[in-house]
Amino acid sequence: MRNLSLLQRFKCVDLSFPGSPQCFTIRSETGTVLVASELAITEFDPRTEEVHKEVSLTAEDYLPKDGSGVVVAIQDLPDQESVCVATGSGDVILYNLSTSQLECVGSVESGLTGMTWSPDQELVTLTTGQETIIMMTKDFEPITEVTINQDDFGEDKFITVGWGKKETQFHGSEGKQHLSALPNQLPALPWDDRKPRITWRGDGQLFAVSAVCPKTGARKVRIWNRECVLQATSEVVNGLEQPLCWKPSGSLITSTQRHPNKHSVVFMEKNGLLHGDFTLPFGKEQVKVKELLWNSDSTVLAVWMEDLKPGENDHPNTYIQLWTVGNYHWYLKQSVHFGSEPLRAPVCVCWDPEKPLRLHLLTRGWASYTYDWGWSTERSHGTDCHDNASVAVIDGDKILVTTFRQCVIPPPMCAFELQLPVPVNLVTFRSQAQRTNELAALTADGHIYVYGQGESCNLKRDSNITLFRISHLHFLYSGGGVENGAQGLGITKAFEFFKLFMQCLFFLNSWSFLRSDVPVDGFVISLCHSLRNGTVALQLDDGQIRKVHMDSSELSLTEWKDSTGNTINLPRPCVQTALFTLSGEEHLIGLTERSHLYIGDSLVASNISSFVVYDDFLLLTTHSHMCHCLNLSTLSIKGLQSALSSDANQNDETVRKVERGSRIVSVVPQDTRLILQMPRGNLETIHHQALVLAQLRKWLDSLRFKDAFECMRKLRINLNLIYDHNPTVFLANIEMFLKQIDSINSINLFLTELKEEDTTTTMYRCPSRSASSSASGKGGKKVDIICDALRSTMETLDPQKYCLCILTSHVRKTTPELEIALQKVHELRVNPPSGSSSVSAEEALKYLLFLVNVNELYEQSLGTYDFDLVLMVAEKSQKDPKEYLPFLNMLKTLEPNYQRYTIDKHLKRYRKALHHLSKCGEEHFTELLNLVKDQRLYSDALELYSSNSEQYKTLSVAYAEHLVEQQQAEQAGLLLWRCGENARALQAFVSCTSWRNALAVATHIPLPPEQLTVLARDLAEKLLEARRHTQAALCLEQYAKDCEEAISALIQGAAWEEALRLIYLYNRQDIIETDLKSALLDAHSNQTSFLESQKALFIRHKNRLTVVRELKAKSLRVSDEDGPDCADAELYSEASSVLTGSHLGSKYSRSNSRISSRSSKNRRKAEGKKHSLKEGSPFEDIALLNALTQIIIIVDKTRGELRTQQKHVILI
């Protein structure tokens, strides 16, 4: 849905060159034009009118001096730095551009009618006056000469096996006799010049020749290969005309055909068969087509036409039309009228070989025109809901308008058409808030038409505005200063004619007047206006940017400057520009024809195919088939460059994949739709996630819950965002939420999608929001908060209407409240509601069965002990009655408490079952005890009985047995002691060596003295095994009454002070000589040996550390002197010091890098090697320091023991 907009036009008038122009060619290297006349060859620059070279063709008699000579073709040859010229007299002349020498490289006696070079300029084909084709190499060596008109079809003649032959088909009243009749071939049209035309295919493998057959007088097209061998001949096409052009990037040959009722451009395949056409917008006898010209990228077809009947001054009008195709429809995008003045009629037209949308033409009056067009999408500029997202497409004298807010209609169809009397060249939408659907159109005859909603206005042409001079049209609003009741609607346009002017035109009803103008120092190639800020900017052909000021009564221009006062210009001219605000500063963004995107003078990306600025977003499509949607309010220029540098982050909401070759058409304002057009022309609507989320946030901020909900449901956005976006606001406006949604199903859908995840921090991150702003509105779990809040509000508003939603809120809680939900259903059954919007119990139960598993709901209903409710659930659950009726009948026969116990045990609610069973009497205590043992409910069971009861004692004993099995004998002993089982408690205390409790229980029993002594000795033995010497001594001294064994235990445990106390207490000084002295001296000797060994080890490690540090410093000095061979200095042993530092260091560096990527076990192993004391290891110094630290810690721990030992050694 793109139009061709004129960017700039260069005009050279009154060129004083000899003769009259006959043909020309473009030098791709310099951009100059080479023109051949009947007298000379001239090279000039169309921008500066500077003549570079001029050489006469009559000086050396190549052409007669009387001006009767004819130049049939001219071709630039960049590889040979020459120009090839073919004359009608038969000479082929080579003009060397470096030496300015002419050379005749060949001559044909019969004369030449045409010359065409292959696209690779390796071959040249000449058509002669004898209706032959001469093919030569680029060095003008003849290859072959063949006759144009041949009777043979060619090598690609169709082959048939007889299927579908005309002889076997029904022929109606004509019969089979008409098969023998030759087809009626009409001769060529009278105005046909009867000259052959040659055109090459883009790859240079085939060329086509259109010539008049001498037998029939009709034109035929023949296709030849590169070796000049005939391949195919076209079918009979009556009315076929002389133009011929092969589409460069396709297989279609273009020509024109005149039908009895229309005039068409037709297409042929390489086998000569017709393949489609389109009709020219003229009568059948109105115009003749002089030439057809495809541009270099095959996107635009230029049709050069001339009236058959002369105009007012007896001279025909001349036209050039530019046609494009999309979705198999041909659009007339530009129509250039040259009038009937003879000197203004084009004599030569051609496309630029380098720039696809640049057209060159030369008139008979030696005026040169160069047109630069660019692709543009004319879309409305509004950002509010009043804008219809309109896009206007030019199609000849029609403007096809599609309003994407209402509908998406694929081209060539549209929402509505605007019919104009003449073809349209330019269309633009009004740039004023709430009136952006209005548009203005510039027609080929210079009139401006303004269309509003339900009205239109034709602006009469101002006397100062002449043909070909308007190049840009922008429809905007200009404030005050308009007199005579003008409406204040401004049309701003730039045009060039020697000097360039910027004019502001106002209209009043049906006539226009000029308000002001201002000169511009360059060619204006684009205009853009910011609807938000009212800024108007224009771009010159060299990339300069000017700001237009329209506040005062006169227009004025200033340079575009940034916030620091620096002048900003675009590095390259851009075909599309727009204004937007970034980081609080207004910028101009532009896209070049080479897909480079600039913001001011900064290159942002180099693979952009289209872009559009909408609100705070910049939307772009790239040649890597991605669509970016960037939030300008959170980015800087560097941020944009980084975001567009790659399409790596596919999880980012700002980027998504699109179909190959997609381009942006429009964005629907205040909506989520982005319209893309595919290369073949069809449209596709996508909802870019960044646009969707931004719009949803706007709706939620403005409390438009219904719009947000419908959009989220349609686009499958997680509904948790409604709450997560702003929990506090949502909880404060729940009543508004319910009233706006006003749909039971929608509310239930919202409730069922709730989950604890905060979607604003996981799925839909918002970079402009802080973490605190998305926190939960209240303490607690999110799902429970929402369910409770919604249920409370619904019960207040209308509990009958929201019955199902209330049930859903119970079920969807973190811990489902199924019992409460079932109870509400039961209440509906007992007391049926009478309202029209109320829900019956059956419907409510059926809905619950939809939400909850049927077996789970059945068990929950059984847990209510309400058999009516159980039966209701069972009946609706489609369960087999044989599954539940026997069980329910059995339950009904039981005593209530035992019945509930049975139900709870069936539902595995053992605590409740225990509680009910405890009320069933002593006869069921055995069953209760078994339940407690099976489910280990000892603590719960003990709470049900008093501590004096026999049941309590029995449960305590059972609990103690369980604790003994769990290796908790001390707790078991305490429990047994409490309930009076002293003997079993003593046994438990002894088993866990709880000697104090054991001796206390033994005393409490009480045990006889002999048994108490044995018990004390047994406990002392166990304590000695556990190296609890002091406690063992206490048992032996106080309970076994054996002081000698107690002193021996203390000496064994090195408790010297306590041993001396008992020795002197019991007057056993003999033990000092026999046991204490020798033990003390042995301990002292062992301690001294240990300290000596630690001291020697410490000194050895310290000396080694000194050596290692010296080696490390030495290796560092060597590496500094030898250069940066070693990236990291390592440690080396004396044995390995012969190795260089770099070799050893790199070795260990590689080893460690490999280890780091292995398993955790290997990493621990490598960490252990790091503390290896092996000499020469890479971390030996660290290991030595660690070893020294350990020695210091160990020795320090022996300080207290050593002090006590020293005191008693001195004493003894």
Image (cartoon, grey):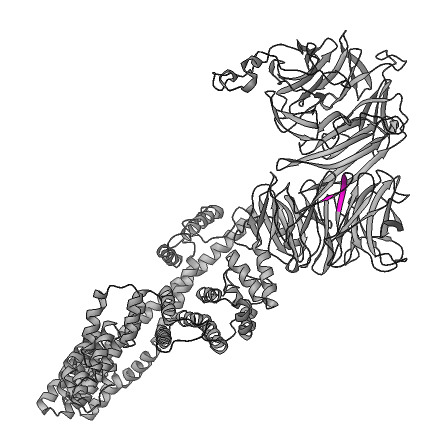
Residue 265 sits above or below residue 512 on the image: above
Residue 665 sits above or below residue 231 on the image: below
Q: In which quarter of the image is the N terminus?
A: top right
In x, y percent, where is residue 566?
A: 79, 54
Residue 1018 sits above or below residue 419 on the image: below
Asked whether, in this view, residue 617 is left or right of residue 968, the answer is right
Residue 213 sits above or below residue 404 on the image: above
In x, y percent, where is residue 737?
A: 54, 70
In x, y percent, where is residue 135?
A: 67, 13
Q: Which residue is drawn at 69% across and 28% down?
A: 264
Q: What stretch is highlighted in magenta?
A: 418-427
Q: Which residue is drawn at 54% across and 54% down?
A: 652
Asked whether, in this view, residue 556 is left or right of residue 950, the answer is right
> Quick one: 770 or 715, which is closer to the camera?
715
Residue 423 covered by magenta stretch: yes
Image quarter of residue 707: bottom right
> Quick one: 491 or 284, which is closer to the camera?
284
Residue 770 visible:
yes
Q: Residue furthest front?
A: 173
Asked whether, in this view, residue 1153 is left or right of residue 530, the answer is left
Q: Residue at x 42, y 63 (%)?
A: 1185
What number of labels is visible?
A: 0
In x, y percent, where is residue 593?
A: 70, 40
Q: In which quarter of the image is the C terminus?
A: bottom left
Q: Residue furthest top?
A: 109
Residue 787 covered by magenta stretch: no
Q: Is the magenta stretch mostly helix, strand or loop?
A: strand
